[in-house]
Structure formats: C-alpha cells, structure tokens
Image (tube, rainbow, N blue to C red):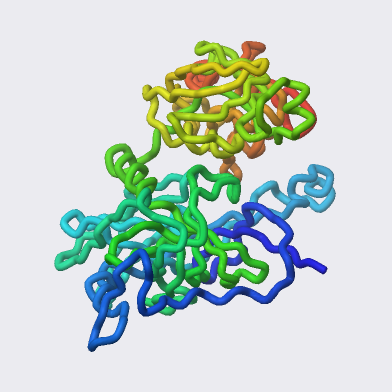
C-alpha cells in the first residue's frame, strides 16, 4: 500500500492553494524525524556554551538577519467553464476572470546591511502589491521589489533602515552530505523559529520546473519558511529553503533549499538589471535513455542528456550538435539527464562558452557551444504599439513549448488583461502566434514590428491541439 506525495513550493502561509511542481509515489512509512545534532560531530565544530554543546552562540549573531515578510496582493481566479464559449454565451457571462485579494507571510534574509538588500523566494512575493519586512526587533518597513526570477525562485527586496545585521554568505560548494545545518524562518507565522538537521543529499534536479541543483535537508521546513535561511554551524548562509516533499503540506523530513552560490549569481543580476538574462543553446530532449535505446543508437551508457531535436539557427546547430547525440559532460561536470544539462546551461550567462563531451555513433566528441540569448522577458503590448492587441503580454517561444507543439518559432501569449482590446479580439493565455499577415513569426522583436500600426492583422494561432485564424480590424 502506498500514498501519493507531492513536491510543493513551501507556500507562504495563508495562500489559498499550494503550487504543485511534481508528483511521485513513496512508501507509507512514518514521517522521519529531524536529525538531532550530536555532542561531537565528526566534520564540524559544535559551539559550546556553559560547558555543554549548544547552537546558541552561533545563532545569537545570526538571528537579527532573518526577517518576516508579509505580502498583500491580488490573484486571478478563473472558472474553467469561462473557457467554454457556449457556456458564456448561454448564461451571458462576460469573459472576465475575477481578482481575489490575498495575504500571506514568508521569510527573508538580510544580505547587505548598508544597502538594505533582503533575499527571499520568488513565490513569496509573486503577485504582491504591498510587501512589508519585519525585523526581529519588531521594526517594520515597506519593501521595494528590486527584481525576481521565476526560473530559480529567487527574489531581491530592499528596505530603507539603519542598524541592520547581514548574514555572511557561505560557499555551498563546500557542503557535504552529512553536514549539520539549521533552518531559520517563520513557519506558520511563528517568527524566528529554528530547526536543525543534516544535508541529506546534494545536486537534486528534476524535482521542479525550475533551474538549479537543490540541497536536500531533513531540517524541518514548513509553510512560512519560504525564503528563510539554511545556515551551517559557522553561522553562514548556505541555502534558501524553497520546497518540500509532502502529502499534507507539512514537513515530513524532506525539504529542498536553493544553494547560496546560485542565489549570489541571481542576486547580482537582479540588482544590476532587475531581471535575469537566461542563456540557451537550442536543443530539445528529455527522453530517458533506456538500455535498449542506448544499444540501438550505439551509445556507451544510458546516463546523459539525449538530444532529441536541435532548434534551427541555434548555437547548438552552429556548433555541430545533432539529434541522437548523448551529452555526458558539460564544463567538466558529469551530466546524468537532460534536466541537469538544462539547469547548467540556463544558469550560464549569454556569451559564455560551455564545453560539452558527447557520444555520436559510439565515438566521443568534444564540442564548445557559445551560450545564446534566451529572452524570456515578456513584453506587454500597449495602445501606442498596437491598439488591437493592447492588454496582452507576449514572450518568446521556449524550447519545451516548441517541442510540445512541434513548431520551431512563434511567440506565446503569456497574459491577457480582462476587458482589454486583446481579450475582446479573442486572444487567450497559452495561445502561440506563429504568423502575422501570413508572415512567419521568428522572434519577439520581429513580432512587435509586424503588429505595430493600425492596419488589419491576420493572426495564425496554435491553441492546444488545434489551430485557428483571428482577424483584428
């Protein structure tokens, strides 16, 4: 007998629904308890107070850097029946999703006392209209959202305050399985809560749709811990709690934190640019390499990233990568599956090179690929650009969407404001525009040029498994 567990973002407390990232089956064994820190750990020096082992000396300078974050905002609530035009017409229901106000709490970490920078999770502040940061001395400040990155679930806030304490940033590359760690945050709005555990595993990938390798820990992480701190025994930040495996939404001893080295990289880009410039090389894969498939393709192993398709005119095509190649190393790091390769490439900066080791027809090859720009930054069409598409937000076609739709180019409708010109024209989120006035859409920039002006627009769309045309006068 088994129970179904799901991996969830550690939802900010009081959010109406948890965000489910993946599902898997686990044994129905009792939930594991968190690890107790022994008096004499073999690989770390445990602080001592009053002659007995204690975490108190380490925590005393750390706690002021951990903050409570409260968020007020609005989320769109849409009844699936609204997508049925017959239902709307029969009941005379306007095609307008409703907005619902929400309030939630999460955690954050002060990382720059002089400039007031606070890091947290993207899902804590997503859709926020108002963000407040409360310090452990009970002072409260309005926070400015500096930037957030959905791909890594990292966000940066800024507050104007004096006498702040910043948490030193450690090096997550130095972590080992078995190292003792402490999680600090506001689970269930219980501020400044400390739990302990160990690093259960490192380099976890494929547990969410996001990028990056995760630290797995059994330190208790619950709703409200999101964006808080995972600290080593030196009092250094080594990770930011983000997700848990859970059936009920509470802790069962399997939590995941974003490594601090990744946080530092993303934080620097968010502070400098307000967003992250994501890299890509233009390959699509994801198929598991079975022993039978490895034999058929004359591959030496069933571990690696199998290239299913190479996007035309992409950096990968220019470098000579072909469908059927098995990529086993990237920049000297062993690649186990396609998800790991996607994370590694997605975190490199545009213009950098990634050195790949691959096998083709049983023979090893070394290929260097220059990272290209994967511009997923959405653009919103305004009345000045195109009156007929005003209120819609568009983004470039990513590799996964292109693969699912079996197309090579186009732009995706990311959002449509209720009662906007775009909504009245019939556009819906998820539509893929592949041509404008019978001209194929190759990029977001080209699309913006094609729709600029006041003439008639003939849009060719992919919507789910079907296709249609829209005429916009």
341 relative to 181 in the view: left or right: right
Residue 137 seen in render: no
| Residue 346 visible in the current orientation | yes
Q: Looking at the picture, how far across and down is residue 393, in whole percent?
A: 53, 35
Q: Position of residue 42 (x, y in %)?
A: 37, 68
Which residue extends farthest bottom? 50
Which quarter of the rendered picture does the N terminus lie within? bottom right
The answer to whether residue 145 is above or below residue 451 is: below
In the image, 231 versus 68, the foreground residue is 231
Residue at screen point 34% across, 42% down: 265
Q: Quadrant of residue 323?
A: top right
- Between 303 and 442, the residue placed more toward the observer is 303
> Where does the image place residue 218, in percent across and percent down from the top left?
51, 68
Q: Nearer the viewer, residue 33 or 398?
A: 33
Q: In the picture provided, is 330 more to the left or to the right than 28?
A: left
Q: Quadrant of the C terminus?
A: top right
Q: Give the number of callouts.
A: 0
Q: Position of residue 379 (x, y in %)?
A: 47, 32
Tell me which residue sits at (61%, 37%) in the image.
337
As drawn, 320 above or below 263 = above
Q: Is residue 429 left or right of residue 450?
A: right
**244 w.r.t. 360: above or below:** below
Question: Residue drawn at (32%, 47%), measured in percent from left and top?
Answer: 264
């Amino acid at each position: 007998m088994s129970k179904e567990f799901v991996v969830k973002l550690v939802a900010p407390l009081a959010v109406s629904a948890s965000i489910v990232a993946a599902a898997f089956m686990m044994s129905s064994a009792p939930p594991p308890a968190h690890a107790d820190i022994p008096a004499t750990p073999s690989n770390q020096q445990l602080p001592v107070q009053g002659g007995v082992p204690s975490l108190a000396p380490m925590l005393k300078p750390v706690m002021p850097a951990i903050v409570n974050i409260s968020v007020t905002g609005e989320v769109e609530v849409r009844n699936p029946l609204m997508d049925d035009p017959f239902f709307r017409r029969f009941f005379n229901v306007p095609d307008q999703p409703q907005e619902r106000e929400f309030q939630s709490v999460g955690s954050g970490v002060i990382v720059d006392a002089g400039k007031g920078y606070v890091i947290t999770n993207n899902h804590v502040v997503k859709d926020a209209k108002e963000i407040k940061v409360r310090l452990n001395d009970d002072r409260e400040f309005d926070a400015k959202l500096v930037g957030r990155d959905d791909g890594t679930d990292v966000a940066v806030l800024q507050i104007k305050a004096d006498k702040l304490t910043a948490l030193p940033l450690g090096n997550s590359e130095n972590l080992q399985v078995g190292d003792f760690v402490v999680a600090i945050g506001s689970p269930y709005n219980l501020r400044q809560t400390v739990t302990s555990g160990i690093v259960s595993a490192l380099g976890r990938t494929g547990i969410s749709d996001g990028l990056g390798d995760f630290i797995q820990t059994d330190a208790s992480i619950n709703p409200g811990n999101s964006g808080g701190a995972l600290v080593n025994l030196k009092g250094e930040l080594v990770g930011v709690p983000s997700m848990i495996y859970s059936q009920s939404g509470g802790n069962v001893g399997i939590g995941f934190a974003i490594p601090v080295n990744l946080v530092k990289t993303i934080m620097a880009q968010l502070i400098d640019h307000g967003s992250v410039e994501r890299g890509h090389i233009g390959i699509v894969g994801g198929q598991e390499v079975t022993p039978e498939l490895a034999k058929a393709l004359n591959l030496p192993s069933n571990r690696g990233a199998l290239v299913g398709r190479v996007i035309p005119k992409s950096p990968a095509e220019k470098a000579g990568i072909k469908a059927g190649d098995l990529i086993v190393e990237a920049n000297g790091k062993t690649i186990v599956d396609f998800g790991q390769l996607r994370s590694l490439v997605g975190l490199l900066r545009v213009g950098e090179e990634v050195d790949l080791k691959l096998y083709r027809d049983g023979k090893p090859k070394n290929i260097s690929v220059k990272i290209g720009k994967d511009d997923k930054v959405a653009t919103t069409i305004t009345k000045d650009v195109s009156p007929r598409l005003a209120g819609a937000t568009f983004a470039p076609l990513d590799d996964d969407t292109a693969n699912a739709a079996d197309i090579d180019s186009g732009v995706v409708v990311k959002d449509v404001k209720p009662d906007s010109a775009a909504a009245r024209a019939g556009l819906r989120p998820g539509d893929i525009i592949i041509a404008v006035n019978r001209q194929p859409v190759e990029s977001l920039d080209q699309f913006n040029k094609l729709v600029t002006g006041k003439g008639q627009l003939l849009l060719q769309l992919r919507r789910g498994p079907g296709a249609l045309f829209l005429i916009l006068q």
